[in-house]
Image: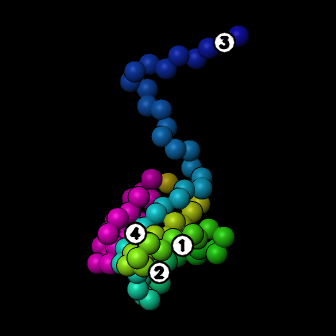
Amino acid sequence: MTVKVRSRDEKVPKIEFPCDYPIKVIGHASEEFEAVVLAVFERHTGGVSPQNLKRQPSRKGNYISLTVTIEATGEQQISQIFLDLKAIASVKIVL
C-alpha cells in the first residue's frame, strides 16, 4: 500500500470543477427580486431549471431566500456571480 503525503507548500484544490454549487441569495420580497436575481444566473450559466431553484419566504413575508444550484465551471465564474448579485440593491446577503 502506497500513501501519498502532501507537503505544506502543495496546494490542495478546494473544489473540483465542474460541480454542482448552491448559492443562496436573500433579499426584500418583491415581484422583481426573483427576476433580477435569476437574470444574473442566466447571464453566467445560460439558464436555471426549475428543479435547481428553491424559494423560501420569511415568516412575515418581508424577505425571500432563493437557493440556486448551478453547475459551476470555475472559481472565476462563482466570484463574478457573487459580485453581480451583491450589486443588486434589494439583495441583502449572498451565501
Please state which of the two labelled residues, at mark 3 or mark 1, is closer to the viewer: 1
| N-term-proximal mark, 3 vs 2 | 3
Q: Amino acid at mark 1?
A: Arg
Q: Is residue 78 magenta?
A: yes
- The CA distance from mark 4 to mark 3 is 47 Å
Which marked residue is nearer to the observer: mark 4 or mark 3?
4
Q: Disc 1 or disc 2, which is closer to the eye?
A: 1
Which class describes the residues within 10 Å of circle 3: few (<14), some (14-19), or many (20+)?
few
Question: Given the image, on which type of amino acid does mark 4 rest?
Answer: Ile
Residue 50 appears in the figure: yes
Which span is picked out in magenta? Answer: 75-95
Residue under label 3: 2
Task: Characterize the local packing of mark 2: few (<14), some (14-19) or many (20 or more) Cα atoms within 10 angstroms.
Answer: some
Residue 20 image offset from top left, x and y in percent: 60, 56
Q: Amino acid at mark 3?
A: Thr
Q: Position of residue 31 (x, y in %)?
A: 44, 89
Reading the image, the residue beneath label 1 is: 55
Tell me if mark 4 has few (under 14), some (14-19) or many (20+) residues whose alpha carbon lies within 10 angstroms of its own.
many
